[in-house]
Amino acid sequence: ISFLLVGMYWVGHRSSFSQVRYVDRNTIWLNLLFLLPVSLVPFAAAMLGEYQGEPIALHLYGLVLIAATLLRLALDSYLYRHPGLLWQQSSKQVRRLARIATAAPLVVYAIAMLVATWLPWLSLLLYLSIPLLYFGLVTVLKADPRTRVAAEDLS
């Protein structure tokens, strides 16, 4: 699960920075803040392995993933608000789809944390579902002629 989630963060990070022409100090700090929770994913995964089925380990895992997602949204929002840092400004549709695809896991992470106390196996299953849901969402968006072009940057 962690490998796939970190892979998703890496692909998103790479996609964001492929559009960056220049970086300023704020971009560097936001990038470092984003990388902090991503670097904690292996630790949170080790806690899941060590304390299987323990709600606190599932909560920690969720908190790390929520922090990474929120900081990724903050970094992308900063870049969108400063188009001079980018090679070219993305369309509103591309930005909206990127925000939705990035933020969608937050709901699942929150649900996974809520059910962890009573149904730890379901919590873990919800975390596992994120890569599947993400790739499913991207596939659906690419299949729709209205969102096909905008969705190309999401994979």
Image (tube, rainbow, N blue to C red):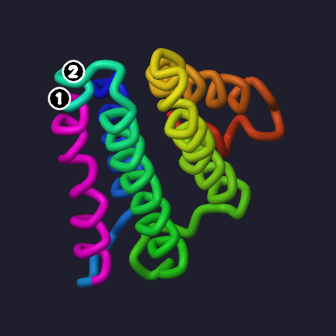
According to the image, label 2 marks what residue?
Answer: 49
Q: Which quadrant holds residue 60? A: top left
**Rendered location of residue 59, percent (x, y):** 39, 41
Q: Secondary structure at mark 2?
A: helix
Q: Indicate yes or no whether the magenta region holds residue 27.
A: yes
Q: Is residue 129 visible?
A: no
Taking the spot 54% from the left edge, 48% from the top edge, the residue there is 102
**Does 20 sit above or below residue 43?**
below
Location of residue 24 with respect to 113 vertically, above or below: below
Q: Residue at x 30, y 28 (%)?
A: 2
Which contiguous range is marked in magenta? 26-45
Q: What is the secondary structure assignment of the residue under circle 1?
A: helix
* Residue placed most toward the observer, 44 or 101: 44
Instruction: Judge from the rendering whether residue 46 lies leftward or rightward of residue 59; answer left or right.
Output: left
Residue type, mark 2 in image:
Gly
State the separation of the CA atoms marked 1 and 2. 5 Å
- Residue 111: give x, y in percent of width and height: 60, 37
The residue located at (28%, 19%) in the rendering is 52
> Pointer 1: what residue?
46
Q: Amino acid at mark 1?
A: Ala
**Residue 33 locus on image (x, y percent):** 27, 66
